[in-house]
Image (cartoon, rainbow, N blue to C red):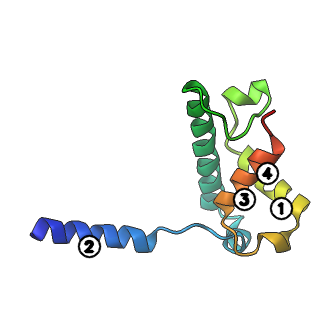
């Protein structure tokens, strides 16, 4: 019984502390190297997910050109995020998580045909 209670407490702590970074949070902290590292990590997660989907024969999320389909440098993701914000307008991004914005920007920048 104590183990179950401890597990529930730990799960509750994880749920309450895990949250996405909103566009406003990102804008306020984007010069922080940790935020840039985080965005690069999210982008790498999408990259590896995309490659895995391709490996198992499922449709990819986005389709970058061939040299980038095997290696996308981490520093490209913050630049993609910022470029997308310039295109769609910052007002449209208010309250949206940067994780979703980055995914949408990859989908729109590198559409699969």
The x and y percentages for residue 72 are 70, 35
The x and y percentages for residue 16 are 42, 74
Q: Nearer the viewer, mark 3 or mark 4?
A: 3
The x and y percentages for residue 33 are 64, 58
Q: Nearer the viewer, mark 1 or mark 4?
A: 1
Q: Which residue is mark 4?
A: 79
| Disc 2: CA contacts within 10 A as few (<14), some (14-19) or many (>=20) | few
3D distance between C-alphas at marks 3 and 1: 8 Å
Q: Quadrant of residue 20?
A: bottom right
Q: Are marks 3 and 1 in contact (CB under 8 Å)?
A: yes
Element type at mark 3: helix
Q: Which residue is mark 1?
A: 85
Q: Quadrant of residue 61?
A: top right
Of callouts 2 and 3, which one flags the residue occurring earlier in the amino acid sequence? 2
Side of 104 relative to 89 (left or right): left
3D distance between C-alphas at marks 4 and 2: 39 Å
Q: How many numbered discs?
A: 4
Q: Which residue is mark 2?
A: 9
Q: Which mark is residue 101?
A: 3
Element type at mark 4: helix
Of callouts 1 and 2, which one flags the residue occurring earlier in the amino acid sequence? 2
Of callouts 3 and 4, which one flags the residue occurring earlier in the amino acid sequence? 4
Q: Which mark is residue 54?
A: none
């Amino acid at each position: 019984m104590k183990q179950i209670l401890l597990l529930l407490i730990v799960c509750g702590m994880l749920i309450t502390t895990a949250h996405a970074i909103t566009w406003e949070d990102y804008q306020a902290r984007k010069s922080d190297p940790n935020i840039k590292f985080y965005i690069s990590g999210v982008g790498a997660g999408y990259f590896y997910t995309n490659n895995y989907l391709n490996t198992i024969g499922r449709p990819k999320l986005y389709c970058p050109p061939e040299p980038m389909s095997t290696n996308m440098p981490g520093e490209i993701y913050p630049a993609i995020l910022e470029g997308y914000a310039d295109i769609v307008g910052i007002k449209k991004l208010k309250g949206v998580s940067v994780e979703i914005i980055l995914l949408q920007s990859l989908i729109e920048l590198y559409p699969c045909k």
